[in-house]
Amino acid sequence: MNLFKILKIIFWSFSLFLLNPIVMAQNLLEISQFSKVQDLTDWQKKSFKGQTSYQTVKEKNKIILMAKSQSSASGLFKEIKVDLTKTPYLNWSWKISNQLTGLNETQKSGDDYAARLYLVKKSKYLVWKTKVLNYAWSSNQKQNSQWDNAYASQAKMIAVKGKEAPTKQWFTEKRNVLADFKQAFGEDITSVDVVAIMTDTDDSKQAATAYYGAIYFSQN
């Protein structure tokens, strides 16, 4: 079980080696605009336990991504080289329908999140040197809390939204990834190789629904 959970955090660190072509214009790097690619063909899927459902839906004339998890752990990921010296800011919007209850996310039994985005800096030859930064919607921790992932110390968790955040409400986020990697790992990490989305509830056996808007990197 532990092996599968570790792989859940770092699987993309060595799974692919070809980069997806993404157009960069005027200091903005688009990761996904769900209204443009509604069939999710520009994302790849990976399942570890069951299938979290990911599909585009329409909400108030806007196309967004909906994720539904029922005791499942699977994600969407995209391999793309992001130069953080040029576009250090990650921008996205999200909301959740419900919090997960009774969790301790610092423990293996509570390693579930209603919504999160992953950024991965791969190590080509030494998988244990892979660095993973998780921007999580925490059901247990306060906003801005940070901790090591319960299964892999090379994965750091940041509660962008915490247990006090209201549900069923959209929030727009902007994070300085360059600065967050420096704070989390104590070293300068100037690029990332993978962006991933995951809504998972396999440890707690609960259900969660989350929604994600456009994702992109920007210069400021």
Image (spheres, rainbow, N blue to C red):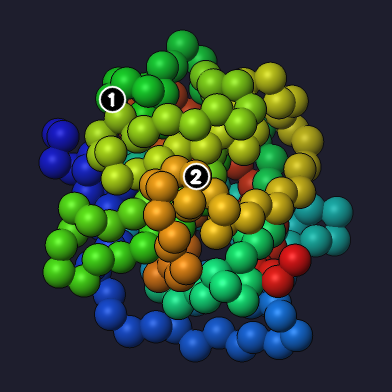
Asked whether 8 or 186 is in front, the reply is 186
Most distant residue in the right direction: 60
Q: State which quarter of the image contains the N terminus.
A: top left
- Tell me the residue at 25%/34% (across/down): 151
Q: Amino acid at mark 1?
A: Lys
> Compared to 11, does 9 lie above or below?
above
Q: Residue furthest front?
A: 187
Q: What residue sits right under mark 1 in the picture? A: 108
Which residue lies under the disc numbered 2?
183
Q: What amino acid is found at the position of numbered circle 2 in the picture?
A: Gln
Q: Is residue 101 above or below residue 54?
A: above
Residue 121 lies in what quarter of the image? bottom left
Kind of element beneath mark 2: helix
Depicted 10 relative to depicted 108: above or below: below
Where is the C terminus found, in terms of image quarters?
bottom right
Q: Quick one: label 1 or label 2, which is nearer the N terminus?
A: 1
Which mark is on residue 93?
Answer: none
Q: Where residue 44 sits: x, y (%)? A: 39, 68
The residue at 61%/88% (across/down) is 23
Is residue 72 toward the left or the right of residue 36 in the image? Answer: left
Q: Who is closer to the viewer here, 48 or 89? A: 89
Mark 1 closeness class: few <14, some 14–19, many ≥20 residues within 10 Å: some
Q: Position of residue 110 (x, y in %)?
A: 37, 22
